[in-house]
Image (tube, rainbow, N blue to C red):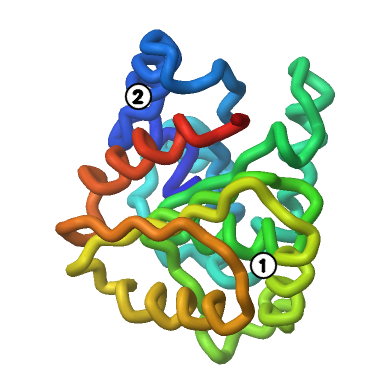
């Protein structure tokens, strides 16, 4: 997740990365679902009745909890239309920036759903004036997630990323609670060149 449903395919080169990893035997074949994280937009520019609208990252739905609340609709649609496995050990969720934020809170609120979690340069905390139940009691939810168990919790960020401090604070929180995770720190900032690398490194670790 991160951006609209086309971002990972175009800017992220996800299809090429996945195809190459699978062809090289470095990743298992998998179904990848890339939703539009902005729930107030029906689809990417040019793909809905809104036409070619100007992209705005701060849409009205940001930090409302809508994406996390209705995420199960994506799961249900996928399970009804594709032959997929439904165990946590056969599911992964990952995203960049705001998509990393969604991945963090979806996995924390539904700790039995995903065995693999990838946070690429993630936003961590909502603004103080956003009080969705989805964002409340994060420490308690993370502790439940820790006790539930998972295969991989993977965090990556660039040294000059503007979210570096908040990710460091989040890691300190995880360390204090004994929440195990894998951390990758790269050069650079909040850029697609980093996120493509993170995807390339993250995917081979899935479904082992």
Measuring from the top left, give residue 71's x and y in whole percent: 72, 49
- Left or right: 128 with respect to 113? left
Quarter of the picture holding the C terminus: top right
What residue occupies the far top of the structure in this picture? Answer: 23
Occupied quadrant, residue 189 = bottom left
Residue at 40% x, 15% y: name it. 19
Report crowding for label 2: few under 14, some 14 to 19, many 20 or more residues within 10 A (C-alpha).
some
Q: Could you say which quadrant of the image residue 32 lies in?
A: top right
Q: Residue at x 70, y 46 (%)?
A: 114
User: Considering only vertical position in the picture, is 88 above or below 2?
Assistant: above
Q: CA distance from mark 2 to mark 1?
A: 30 Å
Label 1 near label 2: C-beta < 8 Å?
no
Q: Residue at x 49, y 35 (%)?
A: 205
Q: Which residue appears at 29% of the width and 36% of the height?
A: 11
Res 179 → quadrant: bottom right
Residue 174's place in the image compared with 3, above or below, is below
Decide if residue 185 is on the left or right side of residue 38.
left
* Sequence order check, earlier mark of 2 and 1: 2
Q: Nearer the viewer, mark 2 or mark 1?
A: 2
Residue 17 numbered tag: 2
Q: Position of residue 97 (x, y in %)?
A: 41, 59
């Amino acid at each position: 997740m991160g951006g609209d449903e086309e971002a990972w395919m175009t800017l992220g080169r996800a299809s090429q990365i996945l195809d190459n990893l699978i062809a090289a035997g470095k990743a298992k074949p998998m179904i990848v679902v890339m939703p539009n994280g902005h729930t107030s937009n029906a689809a990417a520019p040019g793909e809905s009745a809104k036409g070619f609208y100007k992209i705005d990252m701060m849409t009205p739905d940001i930090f409302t909890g809508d994406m996390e609340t209705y995420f199960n609709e994506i799961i249900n649609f996928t399970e009804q239309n594709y032959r997929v496995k439904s165990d946590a050990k056969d599911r992964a969720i990952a995203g960049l920036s705001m998509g990393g934020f969604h991945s963090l809170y979806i996995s924390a609120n539904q700790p039995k759903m995903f065995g693999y979690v990838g946070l690429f340069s993630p936003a961590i905390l909502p603004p103080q004036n956003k009080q969705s139940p989805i964002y409340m009691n994060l420490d308690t939810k993370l502790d439940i997630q820790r006790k539930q168990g998972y295969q991989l919790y993977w965090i990556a960020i660039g040294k000059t990323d503007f979210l570096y401090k908040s990710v460091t604070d989040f890691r300190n929180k995880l360390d204090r609670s004994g929440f195990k995770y894998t951390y990758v720190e790269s050069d650079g900032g909040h850029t697609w060149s980093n996120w493509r690398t993170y995807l390339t490194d993250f995917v081979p670790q899935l479904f082992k």
